[in-house]
Image: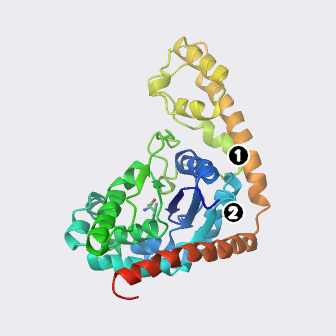
Amino acid sequence: MSDKPRTVSGMRPTGPLHIGHYFGVLKNWIELQESYQAYFFVADFHALTSDYASPANIGHNTIEMVKDWIASGLDPARCVIFRQSRVSEHADLSLLLSMITPVSWLERNPTYKEQLQQITSKDLGNAGFLCYPVLMAADILLYLPAGVPVGEDQLPHLELTREIARRFNYLYGEFFPEPKAMLTAAAKCPGLDGRKMSKSYGNGIFLSENLTELGRKIRGMYTDPARLRKSDPGNPDECNLFPYHLLLSSQEQREEIRAGCVQATFGCVDCKKIFLANLENFLRPLQERRSGLKDGDILAILKQGDAAAAEFASGTMAVVRQKMGLG
Ligand code: TRP
């Protein structure tokens, strides 16, 4: 295992995950655990950078999220699953990296500027929020990874991580790698109403979704807005539902649906029936595994992961301390 390249990634504990998380991120993680020595963590410090005023749900959300990870196929025997806040090296390295990170780099970060503008429901004038990318750089660099699986939205943060690594190496001598982004072709998973799938829009299909409720949700789902009757020819490329057939349906089903939609022989109701059946087949085994996972099992897995992550991270910190005059 130790001769494999390393990779690391994290998710903020926002609660139960939806199928967009699965096809966009988790599926990729599950593949990576085979060929990399992979560290996957709950970014609970990062949750506090914006939700410091209402921390009550972090613990519960952590458990629910890790249940989804494991039910989906992340295997604690194949990768390290842990909590950021329980591996104190994350905080240590973040502090040390903050010494060499110009504030101007943080202030010009596009994600920071955008969120300050867009999120008006909470006060984001705290230092922790400004320093979000320094903490993220610490999360990453601690594990000396070859690459980091992230979504496109995280690219500015990863660029900053590389800049911080370069600055460290310039000041104290070559040590940190400049980790690459491992982007997957973005899986398109629109929400039920056609907007981006998001918990806050209430338009998601969750991995832990009640299967008897699911039919109702799918029946109400948006399809091609220009197709009002079955006799109108549809356009699968404009349809909110068709991208899901690309993810869940067989080649044969996809071809049948596409042809039937364009030729107006196959209606949206028929199309939704196939989607519902395939989605149920996908979710059922996942939910069976999930229901077998007790909170205590998750805590035990995390505890073991915390220790394994700390073991690697403490090795990195010993070198960093030495190089920064604290040896
Ligand atoms: N910022 C990431 C997100 O919002 C979460 C995250 C924190 C992360 N630290 C990381 C991702 C380190 C990859 C590597 O999704």
* Disc 2 target residue: 76
**Distance from Cα at disc 1 to Cα at disc 2:** 21 Å
Q: Would residue 241 be seen by someone viewing this image from the given angle?
A: yes
The quadrant holding residue 238 is top left
The kind of secondary structure element at disc 2 is: loop
Q: Residue at x 26, y 74 (%)?
A: 171
Q: Earlier in the sequence, mark 1 or mark 2?
A: 2
**Percent of width and height locating residue 151:** 44, 50
On residue 283, the disc is: 1
Residue closer to the observer: 74 or 219? 74
- Identify whether 175 is placed above or below 213: below
On-image quarter of the C terminus: bottom left
Left or right of 50 in this view: 229 = right
Res. 212 in view: no
Quadrant hosting ligand 1: bottom left
Give, as a three-letter code, the residue at label 1. Answer: Leu
- Rendered residue at 68%/30% (across/down): 273
